[in-house]
Image (cartoon, coloured by chain):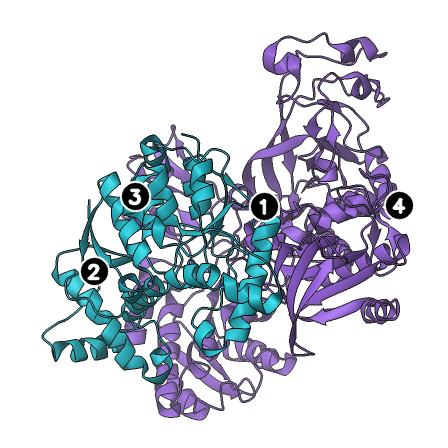
Chain colours: A cyan, B purple
Amino acid sequence: MKYSYFPGCSAEATGKAYDVSARAVCAKLGIELEELEDWNCCGATSYFSARELLSFAISARNLALAEASGASDLIATCNSCYTVLAKTNKYMSLSPELATEVNEALAQVGRSYKGTVKVRHLAEVLVTDYGLEALAEKVTRRLTGIKVAPYYGCQFTRPMGGDWDDFEFPVTLDKLFEAMGATIVDFPMKTKCCGGMMMLTNADAALKMCHDLLAAVEESGADVVVACCPLCEMNLEAYQPKVNAKYGTSFRIPVLYFTQLAGYALGCDPKDLAIDKQVVPCEAVLAAVPA
Amino acid sequence: MADTTNGGEPKVGVYICDCGSNIAGKVNVPEVVEYAATLPYVTVAREYKYMCSDPGQELIQKDIKELGLNRVVVAACSPTMHEPTFRKAVADAGLNQFLFQMANIREHDSWVTEDPVEATEKAKHIVRAAVARVPYQVPLESIVVPMNANVLVVGGGIAGIEAALKLAQAGHHVTVVERSPSIGGHMAQFDKTFPTLDCSACILTPKMSALGKHPNIDLLAYSEVVEVDGYVGNFKVKVRKQPRYVDIDKCTGCAACTEVCVVAKVPNEFNEGLDNRRAAYIPFPQAVPLKATIDPQKCLYLTRGKCKQTCVGACGPEAIDFEQKEEFVDLEVGAIIVATGFEMFDAGREARYGYGRLDDVITSLEFERISNASGPTGGHILCKNGEKPRSVAILHCVGSRDENYNEYCSRVCCMYSLKFSHLIKEHIPEAEVYQCYIDMRCFGKNYEEFYKRLMNEGVTFVRGRAAEVMAAPKDNPDGRLLVTVEDTLLGVVRNLPVDMVILSSALESQAGAKELSQTFGFGCGSAGFFIERHPKLEPVSTITDGIFIAGCCQGPKDIPDSVAQAGAAAAGALALVDNETVSIEPTISYIDPERCSGCHICVGLCPHNAIQYNEELDAAQVIEAACKGCGVCVSACGSNVPEQRGFTDDQIFAEIEGALA
C-alpha cells in the first residue's frame, strides 16, 4: 500500500534521525512512502493561538496537497504534526463554516480540500495496517532481554486518538516492541509531557519535567527509552546533560526513536538508522541484543 | 348518516375549559365557544374555568339530564390527564362513557403555540374535529375478565423480598423466582448500611428467613423466567428451574460436600472474585434456601465425566444427584412484580484509574467484602501485600456523571463513600482517608448529619474528580499509589500518596435488561433501566397493566427507597388481585366472521398474539382480553374486515374532515 508521507520541519534538522530511520523501516517492510510534494510546516506552533483561521489554512494546505496527489492516508511521524494535521482535518469535517473559510483561503492559491484524507501516525499504521504478527515474522534480531520503556509523550493519543488505542493508557508501542521480542517495563509516566517547546521558553519547567521522566525511567529499570516525537526525543536525550547539571543527577539513559530500535530489530544496518547521531551512547543496548 | 344508537339525532354538548390561564391565557376561549355553537348537531357550548372540578363536571351532568344530550365533547387538557375523569362524570349522569370525546387544546395547542391568534384558530379546528367524529361513536361496554389471585415476584433482592412478604401477609399466594442459588441480592454482600451503620446481613436475613418459611410463598431459587404470556389478571409464565445436581428435599445444608469438593479454585462471586469457592458450594452461610449447588461449568464430573466424587461420599442424606435435569414450571398469576436489581459498572473500562492493572485499586463492592467480617480477609482492611493501608483515597463518580459512560448520578455512592471512610477509621484509626468528590449528595433522612459526623472524624474532603491513579515512585515514603486530583477549592493540583484506592462505581442496569423487558412487555430507558408508567406519579407501574417494577431495576436507589417501591408495587398488585375481576378497555378489534375469509394474515401479524383462527367459523377471532387495540390487523386486512371499536373508519374520516374544514 502506498502512503503519503509528511516528514515535518524537525525531520530536516534535529529530528533527522527519525526521518532516516522511518524511511529505512518502511523500505524494509515494503511500505511505500511517498513524500508529500511541496509540503509546508503543519502549524504546530503558538501561532495557532494568535491567528487561528490562518493557521488552519496553512495546515490544510498539506491536506489539500495530499488529496490532490490521490493519497487516502497521510502519515506523520511527529506527535505534534500528527495532532495538528488531524485536528485541522477533524475540525473542517465538523464545522462547515470553517471548511468554507479555509477553502476560500486555499482557493487563492488554486487549491481546495474536500475532506477525503485520513491523517495517521506511523506507529499506528505499523500496528494496524501491517500487523503485529507480520512484523514479528520480519524480525531478524529479536530484542530478547532488552527492557524497553515506550514513551508516548502527551500528544500521541490526546486529543486526536481514536478507537485504535486507549486515550489514557496507550499500548501501541508496547505491543509493537513486544512483538519484536522486547520486555516492556512498567513505566507509569509514559504519557506525561516532556515540556515540549518550553525547553526554549521556560527551560526550568521543561527540565523539571524531563528530570521526573528520567527518574521514572531509571526506576523502571529500562535499558532504553523509545520515543515517537522529535521534540520528546530531543528533550529526553539531548538535554540529559542539562538535567544532570541542574539536579546533580547522573542520567545516561539511551533514548532512541522507535523507528531506530524497530529498524535494528528488523535487520537494518545501524548506519542506515542514523544511530551514530545519538547524544547519549547506545552501543551497549544494541550490543545486548542477541546475535 | 351517523349511527346514533342512543336513539334519535345526535345532541352534542361542547365544554371548553380555561384551565385557569393554561388555555385561556393563549386561546380566546369565548371565541371558540361561539364557534362551537355553530357546528352541526351541537345543542349547547359552554366555557368553564376548571372543567375537571366538581362544579365543572356537574355542569355537564346537568345538561345531559336537562337537555337530553347524547354526546359530549370536552376541549381541555390531554386525555392522558382527564379522559377517565370525564368518562366517569358522563357515566354517572347515565350516558355511556364511550359517547364522550376529549379534544386536547392544551398540550396540543395552548402550550405549544406562540401566537394567540394562531392558537385560537387551531383550537377551533381541534374542537371541530372532535365534534365531527363524536356522532359516529357508539356505546361500548368494558370487558370484565376474572382475576387470578396469585402473584409472581421476579428477583429475590431486598425489593423482591419486601414485595413478596407484603403480598403473602395480605393472604395471596406468591411465587418468587430468583436467578442465583440464594435470595438476598447485593444487600447480602454489604457490610454496614448508611446512615445507621446497621449490619446489612443482620437486618436482611430475618426477612430472607421469613420469606423462606412463609406458607404463602413458593420460592423458586436458581431459576429464571423464560416466557410470559397473557394479560392482566391472567398471566401465564414459564419458569426454568436450573438443575443444582442436589435434591433440595434431601439436602440439609450441612455443607459437608463443599468442604471436600476437589475443584477448589472457582472465583467466588459473592466475594467479588477476591477469593475462591469450590464447584460444590453454598453462596454464603445465611443462604435461603440453605442448599448446596454444584456448578455445572466447573464440576469435574459434569464437564469431563471423571471425578472421585468425594461430595457423594460426604453427603449423609445422599442428596447429590448428577442425573438431575432442568425442569419447567408453568405458573398462572394475576400480577407480576419485576425487581431484578442492578449490576456494578466495570471499573476496568476507566483505564486512567488502573483497576485490574494496579494492586490495591478496588471497587466499592470489593471493599464491602473486605470490610465484612465474613469476607475474604475476615473483616480486616488489608492491602494485597497483607499490610494495613496507611492511607486510602475514595474516588467518587467512577462511571457516573460522565458523558463517556453514564450521564446519571448513581445516588448512593456519596453516602456509601462516607460509610467507607467511617469503617476505615474504625478499623484503622491512624489511617489517612481522602474523599475526592464533585458534590456531596446527602439527600435522605439523617444523611446530612452523617456527613457532618464524618467531617468530624478527620476525613479529608478534596473537591475534585480524580484525574488518574498511578504507581507512585518507589522511593515515595507515604504511599504505593499516587492519586492526581485538582483540589478546586484550593486551586492546586494535588498528588495524594495512598496505599489503597476505592472506586465508587456506578450502579448500572443489568446486562440482560433489554431482553428481560421485552419478555415482560415494557421498555428500557436510555440509561438501560426499566421505564415506569409516569416518572412522577406512577414510579412502579409499567405500560403493561398488571406488571410492576420495583427497586434498582427502575433506577439506582438506596435500600429505604427500594423497600418503599416494593411496598408500592405490592399495593398496586393488591389493588388488582384483591378483586375477583378486572375491567379491560373495549376499544379493541372486532372481526365480523361473516365477512372474514379466513386468510390468516392478521393472525400472524398481531404483536400481542390476540387473534386466533376459529375452525368452526372459518374466520379469525379476536381474544378480547388480550387485544390492546393497536390497529395492526385493521390496516393489514385486505378486505377491510377488522373494525377497531372507538376508531372506526367513519369516526376517523369524520375527525379528519373536521380538522381540515
**Across the whole image, how many numbered discs are drawn on residues?**
4
| Residue under pointer 2 | A116
**Residue type at mark 3?**
Asp
Residue A129: mark: 3
Left/right of residue A21 with respect to residue A221 in the rendered view = left
Chain ID for label 1? A
Residue B263 rendering spot, x and y as whole percentages: 71, 19
**Residue type at mark 4?**
Cys
**Residue type at mark 1?**
Gly
Q: Mark 2 vs mark 1: give the one in front.
A: 1
Q: Mark 2 vs mark 4: give the one in front.
A: 2
Tell me if I can see residue B638 in this picture.
no
Alpha carbon separation for disc pair 4 and 1: 51 Å
| Residue under pointer 4 | B202
Q: Earlier in the sequence, mark 2 or mark 3?
A: 2
Q: Which of marks 2 and 1 is nearer the N terminus?
A: 2
Q: Do the residues at discs 1 and 3 belong to one chain?
A: yes
Query: Relative to the observer, which residue lies in front, A190 or B159?
Result: A190
Left/right of residue B484 with respect to residue B638 in the rendered view = right
Q: Is mark 2 on a helix, strand or loop?
A: loop
Tell me the residue at 60%/57% (across/down).
A215
> In what quadrant of the picture does the C terminus of chain B appear?
bottom left
Q: Mark 1 vs mark 3: give the one in front.
A: 1
Alpha carbon separation for disc pair 3 and 4: 58 Å
- Marks 4 and 1 in Cβ contact (< 8 Å): no
